[in-house]
Image: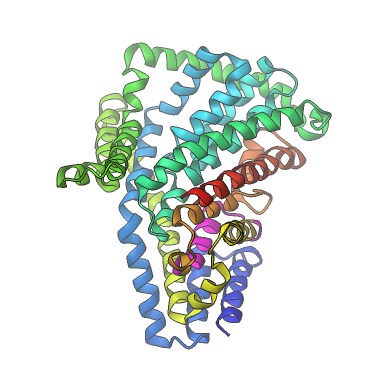
Amino acid sequence: MEVLHTAVAIVLAVGLIIALKVDPVISLIIASLYLGLAAGVGFAGTVEAITTGFGSIMAEVGLLIGFGVLIGALLHSMSTFTRLVHALLRLVGPGRLPYALAGALSTIFPSIYVDVQVVLAAPLARSSAPHIGRRGLPLLAGAIGTGIFAGYVFVIPGLAAVSIAGLLDIPLGTWLVYGIVLGPLTALVTTFLFSLLLRTRYWRPEQDEEDGAAAERETASAEAADERSRATTSDERGLPLVVLLLPILVPLAMIAFGAFADVLDVSSPAIAFLGDANIALFVGLVGAYLLSRSTAGRESTDTALSSGFSTTGEILLITGIGGSLGEVITSTGLDKTLSDLFSADAGAPIIVSVLLAWFIAALLHLAIGSVSVAAITAAGIIAPVVASTGVAPIAIGLAIASGSMFALQVNSNFFWMFKSLLNLTTQGALKTMTVVTSIASLVSLPAVIAIALVV
């Protein structure tokens, strides 16, 4: 009966989110309450499971998410993203810009919330598109889509990556070692494959771009030129770009240092302290705050922090409730049933377990339309049984990450923002965003399976 009640709880949550447009936080709490009460956990036991699960995941990732979001908000206040893209454009030229953009978005900027990334990147894509050719707009749109979400789900401190790692109890240093390779690799390969698709008659500007797209592109080009001029002035008067990137680069280096120290079996309290992800991101936050105060001023810095605090609250709630759902599932005894389903003793069962984790996340994303909610919900469902599967938790986590970005489409708020900002028709947005996230999900899956077989 536990399986039936869990299925009903998931359908209930998805139905509330999709059909009744109920906020995911409320929907997942209702689903957790139903599951606990219907499965016989009891009134007190259900409440205890929800609060315990919430508290446990907050202890794991609460500070990490908060610090990461605030770093992103402060970087935004300093126009770091805009300056980096302009630098890439000068360095590689328009022809290679899609790859440079996908690579930068998937490695350097996962700390910036996805909505902010697309708002910043879209005007630059529209203005640069004519320099690439007739297929420039869809190619850059695809690069933006795959870069943002490959970083979001695979690369620390991307919020989905941090949440999955926390729910599955995966050390962030371990995740970083795999994610920092898998994220940009997925983004670059996807961009290349999508460019091959665009060489066919796949893209039809008259059907896939909004009327007036050309005029809009000219306007965007003029706006981007003005912004490039301001960025150049900022470059001349302000801090070097590499200095503005230190709040991202230093924490990543500290986490990587701690991970490599573990691999080399080098241990000391000082190394453990400096390699701790919470300390690393706090160092990044302090650095970002000081840089923002010196470049953007106190008022802009305070505004950026307020915006970051506002965003953090919702993210922490949805992440914590994902932990609540997982704890309720554990309390029902369903973990024993799922253990049999995920059991893995040899190569084939390992592959089946990875595929099942990927499928659960992909199905939830198709139903819910939110990458983060799908990833957190899938991780919450699978977390109670990871230790008994015989599969490395990092492989299961990466499989969830891969599946959670499959086919982002019309039930996602990001989809409509992407469509509007890039001046695409709904068909055009489907042919870019939905296709590239599907390709990225499928491209990363064989790599995840390979990781599962060797770790």
**Looking at the image, residue 60 lies above or below residue 35:** above
The secondary structure that most of the magenta stretch takes on is helix
Residue 227 at least partly seen:
no
**Looking at the image, residue 407 lies above or below residue 321:** above
Point out residue 282 in the picture as x, y percentages from the top left corner. Answer: 26, 43
In which image quadrant can residue 416 be found?
top right
In this view, the residue in front, 341 or 142, is 341
Residue lying at 63% horizontally and 49% vertically, measured from the top left = 406
Point out residue 431 in the picture as x, y percentages from the top left corner. Answer: 74, 39
**Looking at the image, residue 160 lies above or below residue 189:** below
From the viewer's perspective, tell me whether residue 70 is left or right of residue 105: left
In this view, the residue in front, 71 or 326, is 326
For the N terminus, the quadrant is bottom right
Point out residue 449 in the picture as x, y percentages from the top left corner. Answer: 57, 50
Residue that extends furthest to the front in the rendered view of this protein: 346
For the record, the magenta segment spans 366-384
Residue 235, magenta (yes or no) = no
Residue lying at 32% horizontally and 27% vertically, measured from the top left = 296
Residue 253 at least partly seen:
yes
**Looking at the image, residue 154 lies above or below residue 385:** above
Residue lying at 53% horizontally and 64% vertically, measured from the top left = 345
In which image quadrant can residue 300 be found?
top left
Point out residue 367 in the picture as x, y percentages from the top left corner. Answer: 65, 60
In this view, the residue in front, 165 or 300, is 165
